[in-house]
Amino acid sequence: MDKSSNKKVLEVKNLFVRFGDDLIIDNLSFDVAKGEHLTIIGPNGSGKTTLFRALIDTIPHQGEVIWALDTIIGYIPQKLDIERNVPLSLYDFLQSKNSGLKGIGDGEIKDCLKLVNLPEDILGKPLGALSGGQFQRALVTFALIGSPTVLLFDEPTAGIDQPSEEQIYDTLHRLQDERGVTIITISHDLSLVHRHAHKVLCLNRRKICYGLPEEVLDKQTLSRLYGTEHHKFFHHIHDK
Amino acid sequence: MTNNELLSIILAAITALVSGVVGSFALMRKMALAGDALSHVALPGIGVALIYSLNPAIGGGLALLVGAILIWKIERVTNLNTEAIIGVLFAVSLAAGGLLIESEHELEEALFGGVATVTVNEFIAGVAVAVLSLWFLLRNRHALVLSLISKDLAKTAGVKTETQQLYFLLIFSITVILGLKFLGVLLMGSLIIIPAATARNVTQTLSGMLATASCTALIAVLGGFAARALVETALGPSIISIAGLMFFISLLARRA
């Protein structure tokens, strides 16, 4: 990981997101350095996915979201609502990224498939025929096309089995080591935070904690974030 | 067969190819019903053109382009979906057109088409517009696909979904204008949607869908002209009946 320059890739200042009268994100500020892995945690409805959508500027927001000039974002949404009978193959889906980033060749698509361990022969399969795990990895492949400098993963390993999950995190670590890619993930799994993240942001509409996981994730913080039932889980992961 | 009739068949065939491609994207964008109804927005424009003795295609075309921009704008401002907006515009346009067009014959022609000849100027303009539309759609197919899959993914890939939606509505309107003479406002939407729906039953890839929809539309149009020549049936209803028949056949071959 290249953090020597400590160059900021993302700076968020006083971010507010409202849906009507509902304040979803309340005065949030944080920043992310190049090559860092930040994980955002918080209960359901705490504004994690909304934060991502504000970061990629697809919802109205107030405050500042400043990306470094050379930033190329690869985004992996939690899910996509695609009709099962939509007449699109995996190849059609991956090629569609060509619309914004011209000149994506089949070679790059195949390289990205290899990174997530998807065989080339499923490129012709209809999207609706992919299994849940294959589709999840197809989304990761889509994000990796175009050599992103930042990856935004919304629950990157939800719905896939343990070996595939490890594979995806191995890929992430390799991208960080080899290309200095910055990673921001949303996760429900606290054990993943301790295993993989450099920094953690606890979000429940506003910032509950932010910093190194071993320093900021204590009992009191998790109680404030989730409620008392997470105490047991906190002990469990530290007893390992 | 006169030269003008031949030009008319060639223009109708090219219009069919564009219809197949436009319809495929309309169907994937869940605009099947809305798309069908959008063509009716031409009716008041045709009415006004007839009152001022202008070419009805120009009046209908202008009304459609204004309608498309209106739909796009209302959608952005109100967050209503395209289907709801077009549903309202459709009913109002049909009513306004019925009031404006006084002659029953002209109203019937505007609704059902049936004109099987075009002038040389209409042919040249029509072919130019059709080829440009086809070129635009094929060149932008990736952006159109991505913007219908996910606005978020499109944004991170540098695609402006709102602009794509406007372009698509405009191309849709242009395609309707191309087919107005042959099919009228009531049936032209069907030539866009039915072949695409047929293709979706039997194909699983984008290129397969675009090619099958265009071929289906082409067969329907040529079949319609043939039926008109051989058994003197009305052109518009013949074309759409053949397209409908092909849709029902495709249901039998529908993939699981």
Image (spheres, rainbow, N blue to C red):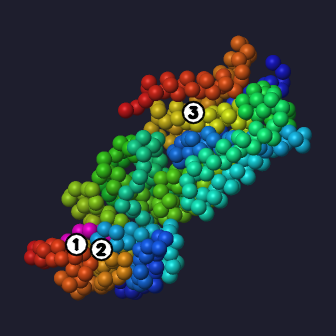
- Label 2 marks a residue whose chain is A
Residue sitting at x 30%, y 74%: A41
Residue position marked by numbered label 2 in the rendering: A41
- Label 3 marks a residue whose chain is B
Q: Secondary structure at mark 2?
A: strand
Which numbered tag is attached to residue A212?
A: none
Q: Which residues are magenta?
A: A186-191
Q: Secondary structure at mark 3?
A: helix
Which numbered tag is attached to residue A190?
A: 1
- Which amino acid is tagged 1? Leu
Image height check: is A58 above or below B90?
A: below
Label 2 neighbourhood size at 10 Å, few (<14), some (14-19), many (20+)?
many
Give residue A18's position: percent from left, percent from top: 47, 74
Residue sitting at x 56%, y 60%: B79
Task: Farthest residue to the left: give it.
Answer: A239
Per the model, the C-alpha gap separating discs 1 and 2 is 8 Å
| Quarter residue B57 falls in | top right
Q: Is residue B66 visible?
A: yes
Callouts 1 and 2 close, C-beta under 8 Å: yes
